[in-house]
Image: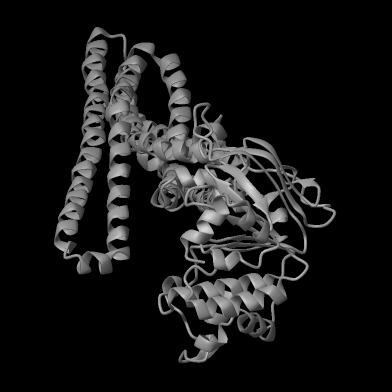
């Protein structure tokens, strides 16, 4: 129940149970001094009545009792800390790892629907919020509930009238908090959305500051950003006001218990149905029992807010992952598409991106995917590597259905060069070594030379050890793309996907890279996507896509003779 309610791991749920027990034990230990205090009150009353120095005679007992109780409470608090805070930090770290592992196995369709800032908030912000909740709020709340139940039984057995005076305000105060729960969670959701919008706005401003300045739109954008930041302040205020008001009302209600004990106790003492020592006992208990609830009501409000974070984690954990065998026992590396149907949205009325795609990309050949923009070329190449799962049909690699192979195992067979190159704020050497982490410096240099990178690397201040900035900001588009090609060459995988790999290169650089690729890609299964027809002029096979369907396929010469889509594209580019 705890695991499901708070999105905990097995270990975390077990630790939480230990924390609840430790918190309950600690709260009970805090009530034990009430007994020692009652003994002292009775001795004082007896001394007043009899004139005997009873307290002086029992002073050693009180001192020893105080030391024992101090030691017991200290030990209980030590155990509680270790069972709550220490294990909470471990659970927080485990939770982030579990979420990261989950994300690693999710299809790319999940990331297409999610905002990156939202995912970052879930892994970092939500885990931090739940760390506080898990370490303090939940153990103390449930521990106080357990303690309250045990003490309630004792009070009712002792005197049900006085017991009810003490106990009834607690559920009434709790009801006040639950009535405000819906409004509080709504305010929390709005607060999270406002913060996410502000984060996105700041990130977008930093990413596009060059374009904004060049278009003289910076002031206009900043005004909109100021509005988003003002909304954060407004939502944060509302997010504090609602639980704060509910908490103040709950604490106001619960303090009526002490007033009820005073009036009811005084009445029962005057009536002769309650002794003065018992009256004092209930007064002491009433003064002590409400202290944990003052904290717990705050913790309950914190838990209500944390449940919003829990729901986001549950949503991520409920997403279906891509599964399969960890071994790909394929016979060769021929890629075959058989009547493949695919849409990015999985609803019944979703528009199909690919409709009945069928073709074969043979090993040892270069197969080019061409067609108008939006025809599905990039989608086909990514489906071959199982970035998404198809709706129907079949895709095989060496005769093996790729839907039966675990994605990471499958991707070991692929080297991919995307149209949008992603580089890291690292050296040239390490950016290329991403293709194969155990590659030697000599192997990295060989791959760079084959991808025609040496020409610009030699101009860099520190050569291969030069830091190229965030996402390769110190390099041109063509230079960044050549580093990406060097990565793919270094990986030396049997299947190579080139998605507009030479799009940012001039004609001379493209020719040099094509010559390098024609030599180094020998014997591999190569899928090339290109808009420029000269890029695919030497391909062994061309598959022309139009409107999500295969319009025609064959050698470049055959397609030119057919006077179809490929021929029109070829002529349109003046070739």
Is residue 361 in view? yes
| Quarter of image, res 469 | bottom left
| Quarter of image, res 293 | top left
Q: What count of labels does the image hold?
A: 0
Q: Position of residue 296 (x, y in %)?
A: 36, 35
Q: Is residue 375 left or right of residue 498?
A: left
Q: Position of residue 7 (x, y in %)?
A: 52, 38
Measuring 52% from the left and 42% from the top, which residue is drawn there? 547
In the rendered image, which quarter contains the N terminus?
Answer: top right
**Residue 174 or residue 159, whichever sits in front:** 174
Q: Is residue 129 left or right of residue 369?
A: left
**Residue 235 or residue 136, whichever sits in front:** 235
Measuring 47% from the left and 65% from the top, which residue is drawn there? 574
Measuring 20% from the left and 54% from the top, which residue is drawn there? 225
Is residue 51 in view? no
Colour approach in the figure: one colour
Measuring 30% from the left and 19% from the top, which residue is drawn there? 172
Tell me: residue 154, above or below residue 292.
above
Q: Is residue 169 left or right of residue 20?
A: left
Q: Position of residue 49 (x, y in %)?
A: 28, 26
**Residue 234 or residue 376, whichever sits in front:** 376
Q: Is residue 473 left or right of residue 11?
A: left
Tell me: residue 140, above or below residue 466.
above
Tell me: residue 148, above or below residue 456.
above
Q: Position of residue 419 (x, y in %)?
A: 51, 63
């Amino acid at each position: 129940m705890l695991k499901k309610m708070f999105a905990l791991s097995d270990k975390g749920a077990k630790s939480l149970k230990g924390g609840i027990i430790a918190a309950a034990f600690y709260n009970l230990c805090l009530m034990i001094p009430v007994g020692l205090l009652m003994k002292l009150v009775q001795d004082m009353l007896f001394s007043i009545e009899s004139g005997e120095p009873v307290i002086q005679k029992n002073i050693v007992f009180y001192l020893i009792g105080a030391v024992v109780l101090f030691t017991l409470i200290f030990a209980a608090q030590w155990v509680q800390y270790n069972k709550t805070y220490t294990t909470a930090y471990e659970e927080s770290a485990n939770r982030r790892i579990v979420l990261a592992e989950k994300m690693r196995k999710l299809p790319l369709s999940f990331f297409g629907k999610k905002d990156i800032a939202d995912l970052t908030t879930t892994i970092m912000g939500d885990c931090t919020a739940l760390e506080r909740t898990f370490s303090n709020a939940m153990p103390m709340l449930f521990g106080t509930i357990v303690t309250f139940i045990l003490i309630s039984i004792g009070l009712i057995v002792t005197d049900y009238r006085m017991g009810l005076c003490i106990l009834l305000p607690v559920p009434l105060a709790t009801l006040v908090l639950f009535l405000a729960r819906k409004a509080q969670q709504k305010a929390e959701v709005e607060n999270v959305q406002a913060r996410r919008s502000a984060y996105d706005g700041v990130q977008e401003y930093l990413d596009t500051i060059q374009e904004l300045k060049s278009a003289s739109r910076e002031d206009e954008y900043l005004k909109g950003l100021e509005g988003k930041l003002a909304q954060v302040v407004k939502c944060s205020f509302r997010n504090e006001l609602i639980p704060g008001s509910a908490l103040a009302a709950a604490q106001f209600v619960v303090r009526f218990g002490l007033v009820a004990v005073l009036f009811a106790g005084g009445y029962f003492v005057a009536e002769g149905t309650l002794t003065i020592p018992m009256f004092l006992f209930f007064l002491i208990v009433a003064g002590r029992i409400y202290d944990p609830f003052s904290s717990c009501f705050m913790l309950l409000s914190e838990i209500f807010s944390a449940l919003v974070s829990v729901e986001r984690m549950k949503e991520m954990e409920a997403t279906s992952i891509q599964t399969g065998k960890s071994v790909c026992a394929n016979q060769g590396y021929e890629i075959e598409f058989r009547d493949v149907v695919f849409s990015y949205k999985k609803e019944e009325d979703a528009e199909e991106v690919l409709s009945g795609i069928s073709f074969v990309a043979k090993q040892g050949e270069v197969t080019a995917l061409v067609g108008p923009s939006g025809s599905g070329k990039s989608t086909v190449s990514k489906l071959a590597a199982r970035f998404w799962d198809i709706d129907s049909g079949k895709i095989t690699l060496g005769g093996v259905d790729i839907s039966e192979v675990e994605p990471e195992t499958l991707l070991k067979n692929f080297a991919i060069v995307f149209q949008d190159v992603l580089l890291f704020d690292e050296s040239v050497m390490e950016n290329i070594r991403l293709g194969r982490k155990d590659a030697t410096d000599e192997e990295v240099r060989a791959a760079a030379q084959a991808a025609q990178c040496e020409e610009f690397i030699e101009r860099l201040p520190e050569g291969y050890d030069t830091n190229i900035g965030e996402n390769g900001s110190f390099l041109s588009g063509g230079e960044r793309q050549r580093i990406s090609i060097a990565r793919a060459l270094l990986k030396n995988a049997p299947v190579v996907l080139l998605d507009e790999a030479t799009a940012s290169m001039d004609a001379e650089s493209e020719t040099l890279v094509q010559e390098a690729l024609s030599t180094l890609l020998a014997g591999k299964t190569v899928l090339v996507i290109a808009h420029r027809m000269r890029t695919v002029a030497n391909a062994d096979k061309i598959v022309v896509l139009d409107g999500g369907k295969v319009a025609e396929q064959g050698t470049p010469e055959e397609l030119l003779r057919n006077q179809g889509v490929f021929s029109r594209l070829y002529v349109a580019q003046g070739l």
